[in-house]
């Protein structure tokens, strides 16, 4: 899996093994001093040594020249045009990152849509005023109603002034799943009202969801996360095209 550059994620907090400064060549240490977080090293052609790093919330490959005195930064391609950088970055940077954030989404304040024992779980950051969130809700109905998928809506409020209050209203509802279903089913005709006085416990949940969204570098809804058939974590920004639905939700 490769994470799109449009989805920058904070990696420095992850519990991946660090390469300590004393183990690094001086040329690599110089980049480390400028903020690059070295996640590991890997073999590279022609006597070079590769290092996988996180810099300003993005994966970055460093290539140390054979003399150990110079570093090249960027992707390396062979004569067939194969990207030799993608696999090491996936293994050392993006893979551990996505697993860590999946765990954080599991612990967030989400509203379930579908059976708890559904074989597939899909997370999405959702705003009550987001028409594309509603579109994905509609797209997913055949899978959810068949018991094949449980959508977990991580409620946030970013689109309109009343979005936080509406998300709070859903989280505070006596039956959040039913309240969410009524809201999404009604679409533009929804009568969901924003809470004017948000209970402290609900505000804490909403703040936690917003903080997670910010930590993951997300700026729009829906932001969808799912596991593919190989168990790799994938992402989709915005309502997916019809041909993407089976990749996200599984076979219909």
Image (cartoon, helix red, strand yellow):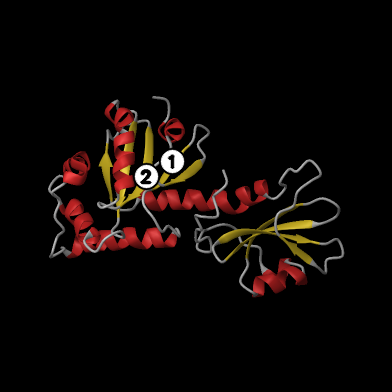
Query: Neighbour class for label 1 at 10 Å: few (<14), some, many (≥20)?
Result: many
Q: Quadrant of residue 218?
A: bottom left
Q: Are marks 2 and 1 in contact (CB under 8 Å)?
A: yes
Q: How far across and how far down the image is residue 68, in percent? A: 83, 66
Q: Which disc number belongs to residue 252?
A: none
Q: Residue at x 32, y 58 (%)?
A: 209
Let me know if residue 192 appears in the view.
yes
- In this rendered view, identify the residue nearer to me: 24 or 94: 94
Q: How far across and how far down the image is residue 202, in percent? A: 20, 59
Quadrant containing the C terminus is: top left
Does label 2 or label 1 sit earlier along the sequence? Answer: 2
Quadrant containing the N terminus is: top right
Q: Quadrant of residue 164?
A: bottom left
Q: Secondary structure at mark 1?
A: strand
Disc 1 target residue: 226
Let me know if residue 176 appears in the view.
no
Q: How far across and how far down the image is residue 236, in percent? A: 45, 44
Image label count: 2
Left of 244 or right of it: where is 27?
Answer: right
Left of 216 or right of it: where is 4?
Answer: right
Left of 230 or right of it: where is 169?
Answer: left
Disc 2 target residue: 123
Q: Residue at x 15, y 44 (%)?
A: 175
Left of 89 or right of it: where is 65?
Answer: right
Q: Secondary structure at mark 2?
A: strand
Q: Is residue 6 above or below residue 149?
A: below
Q: How far across and how far down the image is residue 17, in percent? A: 60, 58
Query: Neighbour class for label 2 at 10 Å: few (<14), some, many (≥20)?
Result: many
Q: Residue at x 83, y 69 (%)?
A: 69
- In this rendered view, identify the residue nearer to me: 19 or 161: 161
């Amino acid at each position: 899996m490769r994470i799109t550059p449009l989805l920058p994620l904070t990696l420095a907090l992850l519990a991946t093994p660090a390469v300590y400064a004393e183990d690094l060549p001086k040329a690599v240490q110089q980049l480390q001093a400028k903020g690059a977080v070295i996640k590991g090293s890997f073999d590279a052609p022609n006597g070079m040594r590769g290092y996988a790093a996180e810099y300003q919330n993005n994966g970055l490959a460093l290539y140390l020249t054979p003399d150990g005195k110079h570093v090249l930064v960027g992707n390396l391609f062979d004569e067939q045009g194969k990207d030799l950088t993608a696999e090491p970055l996936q293994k050392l940077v993006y893979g551990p990152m996505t697993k860590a954030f999946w765990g954080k989404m599991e612990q967030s304040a989400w509203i379930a849509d579908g059976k708890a024992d559904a074989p597939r779980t899909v997370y999405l950051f959702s705003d009550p005023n987001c028409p594309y969130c509603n579109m994905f809700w509609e797209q997913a109905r055949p899978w959810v109603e068949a018991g094949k998928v449980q959508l977990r809506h991580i409620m946030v409020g970013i689109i309109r002034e009343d979005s936080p209050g509406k998300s709070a209203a859903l989280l505070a509802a006596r039956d959040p799943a039913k309240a969410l279903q009524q809201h999404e089913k009604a679409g533009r005709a929804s009568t969901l009202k924003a809470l004017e006085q948000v209970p402290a416990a609900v505000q804490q949940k909403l703040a936690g969801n917003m903080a997670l969204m910010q930590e993951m570098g997300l700026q729009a809804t829906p932001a969808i996360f799912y596991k593919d058939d190989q168990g790799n974590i994938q992402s989709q920004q915005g309502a997916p095209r019809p041909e993407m639905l089976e990749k996200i939700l599984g076979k219909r």
